[in-house]
Image (cartoon, rainbow, N blue to C red):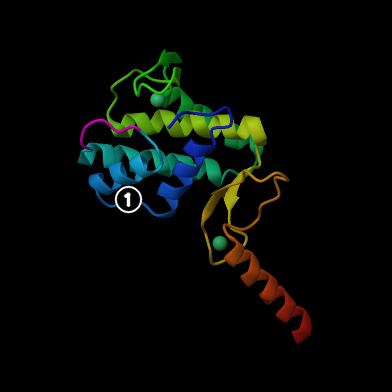
């Protein structure tokens, strides 16, 4: 996975992992690989533990009450996770930037990737473009990469569900 200027893949991976937490180190590694991340070596229970801590911190960024708090929480993640940027060609498919040393364990790598990817997404597309589905009983997190930046639901299914409900509520009166 290369961090594109909008951090889209990284922030989407964070949402995917937060919405359905991996339960084993193996599952964590598999899902990171499926998202396009180069994972060298097997993941360990420490990676899983570290990933859980990163996702906990990241969910606080998602649930921040305003932009300032969101920025502050994310800055804390960046300070803990991101190293100086460096050029790398570790996967042999082109030079790109990493905000960490080469050969980090997966948990540490996710720290850096999620913090930097989320920062790029928010400053590139808009600080409000991270949230939870507007359907009350659905707490699914989404990163809004739509053209308009007005996404309110995690999926079309939830959007339809809410439209039907609002329609019924109007006609029940
Ligand atoms: Zn890379
Ligand atoms: Zn939803």
Q: Which residue is tagged 1?
A: 22
Q: Quadrant of ligand 2?
A: bottom right
Q: Secondary structure at mark 1?
A: loop
Q: Position of residue 87 (x, y in %)?
A: 43, 13
* Residue 98 higher or lower than 144, as above or below: above
Label 1 beta carbon within 8 A of ligand 2: no
Please tell me which residue is depicted at 61% across the width and 34% down the height of the picture: 122
**Screen quadrant of the C terminus:** bottom right
Residue 159 in the image: above or below residue 107: below
* Residue at position x 75%, y 86% in the image: 172
Residue 129 visible, this angle: yes
The magenta region covers 38-42
In the picture shown, does residue 68 fall above or below 92?
below
Name the chief secondary structure element in magenta. loop
Residue at image position (55%, 30%) is 119
Labels in figure, total = 1
- Is 169 situated left or right of 142 in this image? right
Quarter occupied by residue 57:
top left
Q: State the image coordinates of residue 135 (x, y, percent, origin top left).
A: 60, 64
Reply yes or no: does residue 46 show up in magenta.
no
């Amino acid at each position: 996975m290369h961090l594109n200027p909008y951090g889209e893949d990284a922030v989407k991976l964070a949402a995917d992992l937060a919405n359905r937490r991996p339960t084993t180190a193996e599952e964590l590694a598999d899902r990171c690989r499926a998202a396009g991340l180069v994972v060298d070596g097997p993941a360990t229970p420490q990676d899983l533990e570290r990933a859980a801590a990163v996702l906990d911190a990241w969910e606080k960024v998602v649930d921040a009450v305003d932009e300032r708090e969101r920025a502050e929480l994310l800055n804390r993640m960046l300070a803990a996770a991101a190293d100086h940027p460096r050029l790398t060609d570790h996967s042999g498919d082109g030079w790109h930037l990493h905000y960490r040393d080469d050969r980090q364990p997966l948990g540490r790598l996710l720290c850096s990737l999620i913090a930097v990817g989320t920062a790029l997404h928010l400053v590139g597309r808009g600080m409000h473009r991270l949230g939870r589905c507007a359907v009350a009983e659905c707490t699914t997190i989404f990163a809004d990469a739509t053209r308009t930046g007005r996404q309110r639901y995690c999926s079309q299914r939830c959007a339809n569900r809410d439209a039907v409900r609002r329609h019924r509520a109007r006609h029940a009166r």
